[in-house]
Image (cartoon, rainbow, N blue to C red):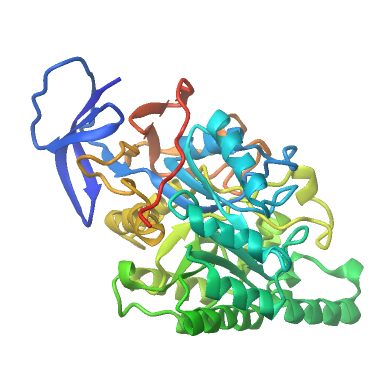
């Protein structure tokens, strides 16, 4: 089906202008102040609303295969689309982990059948699968990147062998995405506080001092040293500390950077001051830390030392999150509400609408060299979102689409609403209703 969206404020490439937008055969055919086209189409009145490129989330955990009691690719992609995220890149620490080319391709096959959003999946790195990882070089136009957990993870995915790290950083032709926390520092801190207060007395308030600034900094520094040694393309995920920001620069445009960094919405929004009332619901790795880190992250985001806003969407069941601190898993479900949260911060004057689009839509496309997405441009795929900045959205059980059924924003009212989400020109979501007649597409990359 073709569409014309009339008189809508188009937010794209640093400007906001009122335009008509014609969507034809899955792509943006024309953008102009007034359009007259022949043929059949459905007209949408965009007056008073804004059109954004679809959000591209470069870090999610959709839990399939193996952990489908928490989430599935179907449920979480659906939630993503409801929140204006049209493309995602998913992490390899499922069960089994995506540590072989065959297991990686299994995830693509699941998404092809079930994902309402566009998709890509990272190849996982372990201490003993270097040869398998480097096979991905031959498929670099079809895989978003390789993922290294340089800190604790599930299964066999903690990579702490420096020979392995050298082989990956020297041999990979793809973007290398890293989770950076130093495992030795974390273990030493944990044992220290177990001895001081007793394991049974540890609560989530200890989380940011067990997984502290030093653990993040030392690991990020090590990753950067490897990347500089081999001129690797490094992307460090979920920066959470002020100290790490000295490692990143804004001296080059994004497309010329070899080392880039991501910040997640929860590290921009919450601080350690929220643990007393949020508890394990905001327990995540890296930890949400003292408030001065949040302020520093905002400053670095706005001056372009931090390049991308993402979620690290990581759902667990309500029951799992209400276990004692040491047993409760880390991770927060966020992908449905990330755009709404950033639109709220825009309404508060913390960031402009144009900067939100830059960091959530344009920058992921540039950083990962995604083909024909991330912008509202003629000829690009029609991944786009209509938002109403005058219509509030209150989060409740009835409109949470995550399989886990809960959100840290439950009962919160955002001052905006996602009204329409187009994925490849298909109107997949409209005012609380889904159209699942078409599936998303595999992301392709200009490499």
Give the residue drawn at x 46%, y 33%: 440
Give the residue drawn at x 74%, y 81%: 185
436 shown above or below 60 = above
In the depicted view, which residue is nearer to us: 392 or 28?
Answer: 28
State left or right for residue 85 relative to residue 291: left
Image quadrant containing the C terminus: bottom left
439 shown above or below 148 = above
Q: Where in the figure is residue 296, as x and y percent of width and height? A: 46, 76
Q: Where in the figure is residue 188, as x and y percent of width and height? A: 80, 82
Image quadrant containing the N terminus: top left
State left or right for residue 296 relative to residue 28: right
Q: Where in the figure is residue 407, as x and y percent of width and height? A: 61, 44
In the depicted view, which residue is nearer to us: 321 or 362?
Answer: 362
Q: Which quadrant of the view contains residue 290?
A: bottom right
36 shown above or below 193 = above
In the depicted view, which residue is nearer to us: 24 or 417?
Answer: 24
Q: Which quadrant of the view contains residue 64?
A: top right
Q: Where in the figure is residue 331, as x and y percent of width and height? A: 67, 55
In the depicted view, which residue is nearer to us: 188 or 8?
Answer: 188
């Amino acid at each position: 089906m073709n569409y014309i969206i009339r008189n809508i404020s188009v937010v794209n490439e640093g400007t906001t202008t009122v335009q008509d937008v014609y969507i034809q055969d899955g792509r943006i055919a024309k953008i102009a102040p007034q359009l007259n086209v022949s043929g059949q189409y459905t007209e949408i009145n965009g007056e008073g609303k804004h059109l954004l490129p679809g959000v591209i989330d470069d870090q999610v955990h959709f839990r399939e295969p193996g952990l489908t009691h928490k989430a599935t690719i179907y449920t979480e992609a659906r939630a993503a689309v409801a929140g204006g995220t049209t493309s995602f890149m998913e992490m390899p620490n499922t069960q089994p982990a995506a540590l072989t080319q065959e297991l990686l391709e299994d995830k693509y096959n699941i998404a092809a059948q079930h994902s309402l959003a566009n998709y890509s999946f990272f190849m996982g790195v372990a201490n003993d699968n270097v040869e398998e990882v480097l096979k991905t070089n031959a498929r670099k136009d079809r895989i978003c990147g390789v993922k290294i957990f340089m800190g604790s993870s599930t299964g066999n995915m903690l990579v702490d062998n420096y020979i392995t790290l050298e082989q990956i950083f020297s041999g990979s032709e793809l973007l290398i995405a890293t989770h950076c926390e130093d495992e030795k520092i974390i273990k030493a801190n944990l044992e220290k506080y177990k001895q001081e207060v007793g394991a049974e007395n540890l609560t989530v308030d200890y989380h940011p001092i067990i997984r502290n600034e030093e653990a993040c900094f030392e690991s990020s520094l090590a990753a950067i040293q490897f990347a500089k040694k081999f001129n690797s393309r490094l992307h460090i995920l979920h920066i959470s500390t002020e100290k790490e920001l000295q490692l990143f620069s804004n001296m080059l445009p994004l497309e010329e950077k070899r080392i880039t960094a991501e910040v997640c919405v929860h590290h921009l929004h919450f601080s350690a001051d929220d643990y007393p009332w949020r508890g394990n619901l905001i327990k995540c790795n890296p930890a949400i830390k003292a408030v001065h880190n949040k302020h520093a992250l905002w400053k670095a985001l706005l001056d372009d030392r931090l390049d991308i806003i993402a979620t690290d969407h990581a759902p667990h069941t309500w029951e799992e999150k209400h276990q004692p601190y040491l047993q409760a898993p880390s991770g927060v479900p966020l992908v449905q509400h990330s755009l709404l949260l950033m639109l709220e911060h825009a309404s508060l004057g913390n960031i402009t609408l144009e900067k939100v689009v830059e960091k959530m839509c344009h920058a992921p496309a540039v950083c990962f060299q995604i083909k024909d997405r991330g912008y509202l441009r003629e000829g690009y795929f029609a991944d786009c979102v209509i938002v109403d900045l005058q219509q509030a959205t209150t989060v409740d059980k009835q409109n949470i689409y995550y399989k886990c059924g809960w959100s840290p924003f439950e009962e919160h009212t955002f001052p905006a609403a996602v009204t329409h989400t187009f994925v490849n020109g298909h109107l997949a979501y409209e005012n609380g209703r889904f159209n699942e007649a078409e599936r998303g597409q595999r992301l392709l990359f200009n490499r």
